[in-house]
Amino acid sequence: MEISSRWNDGVFTAHMERLVWTASPVVRRYLHRLVSGNPHCDWLTFVEAEHLPARVEKALVLGCGSGWLERALSERGRFGRILACDAAPATVDRARREAEKAGLSNIEYRVLDLEHAALEGPYDAIVANDVLHHITDLEGIFARIHAALAPGGKFVFNEYVGPNRFQYSEERMHLINRYFRLLPDELRRAFPSGDTLWRRERLTPERVIADDPTEAVRSEDVLPVARQAFHVEREYPYGGGLLNPLLFGIIPNFRDDVPAHVRLLEALCQVEERLDGSGAIEADFQVFVGSRRNGNGSGDGGGAEAESPSRAEAGRTAT
């Protein structure tokens, strides 16, 4: 797995986290509602309550990044051992230090090349977050994940599943720019340069590859290949077809303490939801829950799910 050296740079990673559409709490509340039905219940809290058993003895986190996900799971108290891995050594080191600082002793960290590395098992739960769209051999990694799952174990991922290399159609770009032109000048300033942007341009594949050779390399294949490899328990699409390309790089201009900015973001969320509902665009982000095709209680034709709380009950677990 050829990763860009920039992902080993903590300053670069923090900078990127400020630029993406999900940096806004207004947008995050919208996304929470699309997945869980509750704007105050995030996808991880919901999936854990709705799809995972009361006790998970052994879990694997793929693409741990900053480490927030495994720390959140560890703090729940229902997880035994958690192995978290990433391909960037410096990223893994930072996540390990944060877990140690938080006193979380049940998390083990490892540097793994997910394109090729064997996955130890069996695991009661495997969670991949924002990493599969960087994988070229999806068939291979899904086969290894399937083999590493315990009977009855669950595979969960949260991913960008939109067009490869962000090659949006002309129709999509037209929609994006229609709403981009409606934004006031002060909200169309690129961060951190401050230059006012007049339209959104589609990135060329060459530019994307130069920035990161693995970025969205087979993103549009993630869902179809996963559906072939696993018994599908649930899929939760959560937008991004409009807002992700529209807001990237300008989201820091929207201030949470300015009511007009909040109302505008809420209106844009409503627009995306209507466009998605009408079929004008498709959701580019998805939470997927699956299990072994030959596991106990989850064959090719479906199977019984573990008893789980309702959406309303899951929402009350949010912190």
Image (cartoon, helix red, strand yellow):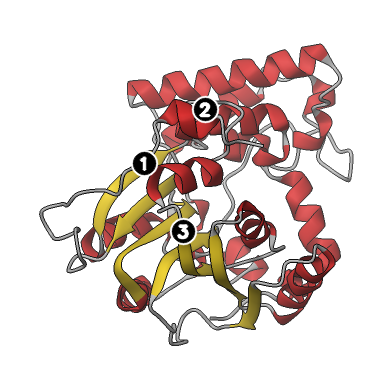
Of pointers 2 and 1, the one earlier in the residue sequence: 2
How many residues crowd around disc 3 within 10 Å: few (fewer than 14), some, or many (20 or more)?
Answer: few
Position of residue 83 in the picture relative to residue 181 (left or right): left
**Residue 265 % position (x, y):** 67, 21
Residue at the image position 65 percent from the left and 26 percent from the top: 180
Question: What residue is disc 2 on?
Answer: 33
The quadrant in which residue 94 appears is bottom right
Badge 2 amino acid: Arg
The quadrant in which residue 290 appears is bottom left
**Residue 209 % position (x, y):** 58, 68
Question: What residue is disc 3 on?
Answer: 55
Badge 3 amino acid: Arg
Question: What residue is disc 1 on?
Answer: 308
Q: What element carries label 1?
A: loop
Residue at the image position 26 percent from the left and 48 percent from the top: 305
Locate the C terminus by quadrant.
top right
Q: Residue 266 carries which label?
A: none
